[in-house]
Image (spheres, rainbow, N blue to C red):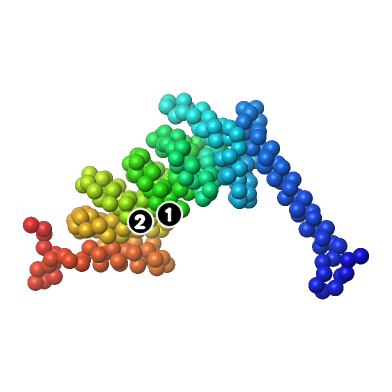
Amino acid sequence: MLATGAGSPTKLQIKAVTNVTALAQVDREKIYQWINELSSPETRENALLELSKKRESVPDLAPMLWHSCGTIAALLQEIVNIYPSINPPTLTAHQSNRVCNALALLQCVASHPETRSAFLAAHIPLFLYPFLHTVSKTRPFEYLRLTSLGVIGALVKTDEQEVINFLLTTEIIPLCLRIMESGSELSKTVATFILQKILLDDTGLAYICQTYERFSHVAMILGKMVLQLSKEPSARLLKHVVRCYLRLSDNLRAREALRQCLPDQLKDSTFAQVLKDDTTTKRWLAQLVKNLQEGQVTDARGIPLAPQ
C-alpha cells in the first residue's frame, strides 16, 4: 500500500498523472490519424482544420508533417488548387479558410529549427507568392494574403542568415512594398515587419542600398506610409516604419539621400500624441534625426547647406 506522508504521492495524484499521460497518448494517436488523413482528398479538409488547431500545442508537429509520406505534397496541392480562383478573383470564404489551414501548417514547418532549412531548400515559399500578388480587397483574399505573409514572417522572425539569403533571391521585397502601400492595416504591419527584418540583416541592408532604384522604391513607399499614418495613426505600424528608416540611416549613401527625403512628419510633432507612451519608438526616432544631422555641413547660422 502507498504511503500518504508529505513526501509521497496519494492514489488520487497517481491516478491523475496516469489519466493525463493516457490523454496525451490519445491526443498523439489523433494527430497521427489526422496526418494520415491529409493524404486522402475525402478526409483532408477536416484533418487540415483539426491539425491547424493543434499546431501550437504539439511542439514536434513540424517534423511529423515534414517526414510523413505525402503530407507536404498534399499541402502544396491545396495551395495549387486555389490558383484558378485568383484570376479572375472568385475565391470564396470557404476556399480561403481551407487553404489558410494548409498555410498555417506550412508556417509551423517554416518556424521549426529542424525543418526550416529543408523548407527553404525545397523553395516552398515561392508557392505562396501568387497569393501576395493578388489585389482584391474582399475578405477571403485579405485573409489569404495575411496568412501567406504570416509564413514569411515566421521565417524572418528566426533571424537566420539562410532565410535572408533565400528571400533576397526572390521577389519578396517588391511584393511587401506593394502590400505596404495598399493592403489592410494588419497586412501592412506584417509586410513592413518582413522588410524591417531584411533591413536589419547586413546583407539585406546592403542589397536594398546597392542601387538607387531599390533604395528610392523603399523610401518612396515608406514616405507614403508616413503621410497616410499622419491621417490614420497606428502606433504598431508606425513603430515598424520608424525602425526601417533608422536602419536605412546606418548606410552612408542612404543617410545622405534621407537628409533630402525624410518626411517632415517625422521631424516635427505630428506623431507626438501617438507615441506618447512608446518610449522605444521615440528613442528610435530621436536616433534617426541625430544620425541624419551627423556629418552634415551647415552655414554660420546652423542651417544645412545644400549638397554641391
Identify the residue position indicated by label 2 in the image: 200
Which residue is located at x 46 percent, y 53 percent?
A: 158
- Estimate how packed mark 2 is, as few (under 14), some (14 to 19) or many (20 or more) residues with alpha carbons within 10 Å: some
Give the quadrant of residue 67: top right
Q: Which secondary structure, mark 2?
A: helix
Which residue is located at x 64 percent, y 37 percent?
A: 35
Question: Which of pointers 2 and 1 indicates the residue nearer the eye?
Answer: 1
Q: Which of these two is toward me, 159 or 45? A: 159
Q: Which of these two is toward me, 180 or 277? A: 180
The amino acid type of the residue labelled 1 equals Asp
Q: Is residue 53 left or right of residue 155?
A: right
Q: Is residue 125 left or right of residue 169?
A: right
Instruction: Give yes or no for contact between labels 2 and 1 (Cβ–Cβ under 8 Å).
Output: yes
Identify the residue position indicated by label 1 in the image: 159
Which residue is located at x 77 percent, y 50 percent?
A: 22
Give the quadrant of residue 26: top right
- Sequence-wise, which precedes: disc 2 or disc 1? 1
Q: Tell me, yes or no, if residue 87 can be seen here.
A: yes
Look at the picture and state if 238 lies above or below 181: below
Q: Label for residue 182?
A: none
Give the CA separation, mark 2 to mark 1.
9 Å
Q: Which of these two is toward me, 248 or 138? A: 248
| Residue 288, percent from left and from top | 28, 63
| Residue 141, percent from left and from top | 47, 36
| Residue 160, percent from left and from top | 43, 52
